[in-house]
Image (tube, rainbow, N blue to C red):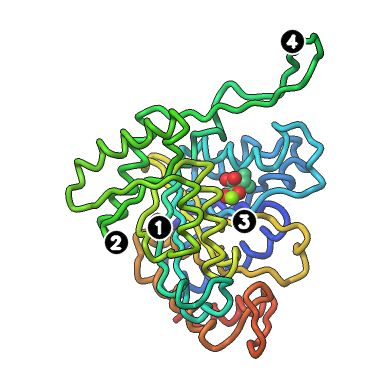
Amino acid sequence: MSKNICVLLGDGVGVEIVKSAVSVLEKIDSVYNLNLKFNYAPIGGRCYEETGVPLSEKTLKCALESDAVLLGAVGDWKYDKLAPELRPEKALLGIRKKLNLFANLRPVKVFDELLFSSPLKSEIAKNTDIMIVRELTGDVYFGEPRGIEIKKTLDNREIKVGFNNMIYDEDEIRRIAHVAFKSAQKRKKRVCCVDKANVLDVSRLFREVAGEVSKEYKDVELSYMYVDNCAMQLVLNPRQFDVILTGNIFGDILSDEASTICGSLGMLPSASLSDGNTPFMYEPIHGSAPDLAGKNVVNPIATILSAAMMLNYSFDNILASQNITRAVKEVLKEGYRTKDIYQKGDELCTTTKITELIVDKIR
Ligand code: IPM
Ligand code: MG
């Protein structure tokens, strides 16, 4: 039986990085006979240009009917002036919501080969291995009410006020907490719930529910940390973390921060999972970097590693997944680097060159 992958290139560097990941998957297919089929659909700015909306019904259908979705990145400054509902980012939030992808797994694992690309001292960055479990369909990203409105001040002036609602119900917290605890059971059995419970009511509920869920996982240790402290601890001592359980906005910010431990934002993959009734989606954690687009310089490894996560989580093929990770590691070991992770003495590669090297290593 064939496996249908919905491929959403998106904008900016999305096109190049997904192309790289697809050639890696094609090679994997030739080794493991997976019978992969790639169905392309536009999303974000590209989709807006073609159809007038950033996420068309056709694209949504392609995603919903697939076995897994591979996404590049969306967004370009040229769309900054569009109405909020037409902006490329809206398509990303839209597809996450429509596919019910509430659990975003962002592994932060440092390759020894890249320790010198990390801005942290090697002895601090070394052996970092964190799984950020970010809730992806709630929080201020989706909370209502939201908007920018006019209000009257006491002295009768009209001023604008912008607002978003940071909101979680206990069902939403419970299901993401289960994902975090299950993930910890396969790792070092520690979950750190990251929130701002000293200030926010929504965080106090988050903590309470995480605590309740933890009772079902007696083998996993639960700790709590405020998000500001977590931001600091990530660069002071990242090895203290195993699984970080957190909400949408804190997870967004902390994962960008954590990526620098690995040497570059271009190294971090992600998997977005649902309850199993809809296909999962795989995308790098970085954005569309329009300034780098079309120059053949972007690092495709985050997307290639996202494809590796797809083989693991959607197709249950751990060997094929590990094959990709090993290939990436070997290429890095031999000193090949894209610009973002380049250090003096390395072999500087284009996007296409490093992709070819990785594809060659898969066997
Ligand atoms: C991410 C990105 C997105 C997010 C943007 C592009 C909407 O930053 O996947 O981390 O905020 O979730
Ligand atoms: Mg982000």
Give the residue pinned by disc 1: 131
The disc label shown at residue 154, or none: 4
Q: Residues within 10 Å of mark 4 (few under 14, many from 20)?
A: few
Secondary structure beneath dot 4 equals loop
Q: Position of residue 19 (x, y in %)?
A: 63, 65
Nearer to us in this view, 86 or 217? 217
Q: Image point 24% across, 43% down: which residue?
A: 214
Q: Give the farthest residue toward the left.
A: 218
Q: What's the distance in space between the residues labelled 4 and 1, CA to CA? A: 48 Å
Taking the image as shown, residue 222 lies to the left or right of residue 117, namely left
Mark 1 or mark 4, which is nearer the start of the sequence? 1
Q: What's the distance in space between the residues labelled 1 and 3, CA to CA? A: 21 Å
Q: Quadrant of the C terminus?
A: bottom left
User: Label 2 amino acid?
Assistant: Arg
Q: Say if mark 2 contacts mark 3, CB within 8 Å.
A: no
The disc label shown at residue 101, or none: none
Q: Position of residue 165 (x, y in %)?
A: 55, 27
Nearer to us in this view, 230 or 261? 230
Give the residue pinned by disc 3: 72
Q: What's the distance in space between the residues labelled 2 and 1, CA to CA? A: 9 Å
Q: Image point 65% across, 54% down: which residue?
A: 287
Give the residue pinned by disc 2: 187
Q: Eyeballing the image, is 120 above or below 85?
A: below
Mark 3 or mark 1, which is nearer the start of the sequence? 3
Taking the image as shown, residue 120 lies to the left or right of residue 85, namely left
Mark 1 or mark 2, which is nearer the start of the sequence? 1
Q: What's the distance in space between the residues labelled 2 and 3, CA to CA? A: 28 Å
Taking the image as shown, residue 89 lies to the left or right of residue 156, namely left
Q: Name the mark nearer the viewer: 4 or 3.
A: 4
Q: What's the distance in space between the residues labelled 2 and 4, CA to CA? A: 56 Å
Q: Is mark 2 within 8 Å of ligand 1?
A: no
